[in-house]
Amino acid sequence: MSSHKYPDDRRTVMVMGLLSTITEHHHSMLQLIKSGATASSYALARDIVKGMRYGLWINRPATEEQIRRIEGSDEFPFSIPEITNEIEAAYSTDPFFVNLKNRWAPQLYKYTRSDVFQVGRWDVHSSPGLDVDDEVIRDVTTAATLCIVLLAAKFLAGHGHSTDCKQIEALAADYANRGKASTA
């Protein structure tokens, strides 16, 4: 993405800011996992999913008026179901989006629920802390990575960089397949 120049309009700046933020969250998530604080990394995974959702919406279906409302508000002024419906309508003919959604939406939902809903998945042993299965960690990190890649690809496509978008989509498809193949 850094090899291109982009306009400084609100839409572009917001999506680039979200990409930067969720990339930082991803780095921090990996550090938490490395340090053994796996359950804490899920909070960042939730923020990555939320950032991707906002970014996809701002990138394509959001109107200029809606973007101005975001800029002037302390809270996100639209409901998640509302923007999710608009995202799905805007990207419904995009095979990359549809494939990732169909393959990874259940994991995104399952692993990004708040901690109180995760209680049933915790496994406490006599040693301090929570035990988390390696497969779960792999699924969460793969899904978080794919959220960033999806937003980056759609951002590039929206700015006329279709060749770069297709390269990212091809790499992501391979990455997603390896993530799912290792769990089979």
Image (spheres, rainbow, N blue to C red):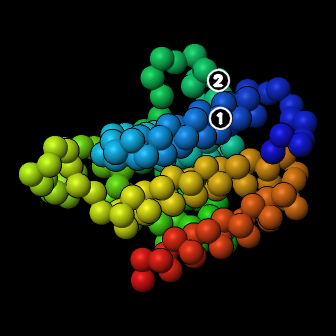
- Residue 26 place in picture, x, y as percent: 53, 43
Name which residue lies at 90% across and 36% down.
5
- Residue for point 73% across, 70% down: 170
Q: What element does badge 2 sit on?
A: helix
Can residue 39 be seen in the rendering of this structure? yes
Q: Nearer the viewer, residue 104 or 60?
A: 104
Mark 1 is on which residue type?
A: Ser
Quarter of the picture containing the C terminus is bottom left
In front of the other: 61 or 115: 115
Question: Where residue 65 appears, x then y in whole percent?
Answer: 65, 28
Residue 165 relative to residue 32: left or right: right
Which amino acid type is marked by label 2?
Arg
47 relative to 110, above or below: above
Which residue is farthest bottom? 184
Q: Secondary structure at mark 1?
A: helix
Residue 111, quarter of the rendered image: bottom left
- Residue 63, located in which quarter of the rendered image? top right
Residue under the point 28% across and 57% down: 132
Answer with mark 2 or mark 1, whichever residue precedes in sequence: 1
Q: Position of residue 161 (x, y in %)?
A: 87, 53
Q: Which mark is residue 68?
A: 2
Are there few (<14), some (14-19), or many (20+) residues within 10 Å of tag 1?
A: some
**Numbered badge on residue 20:** 1
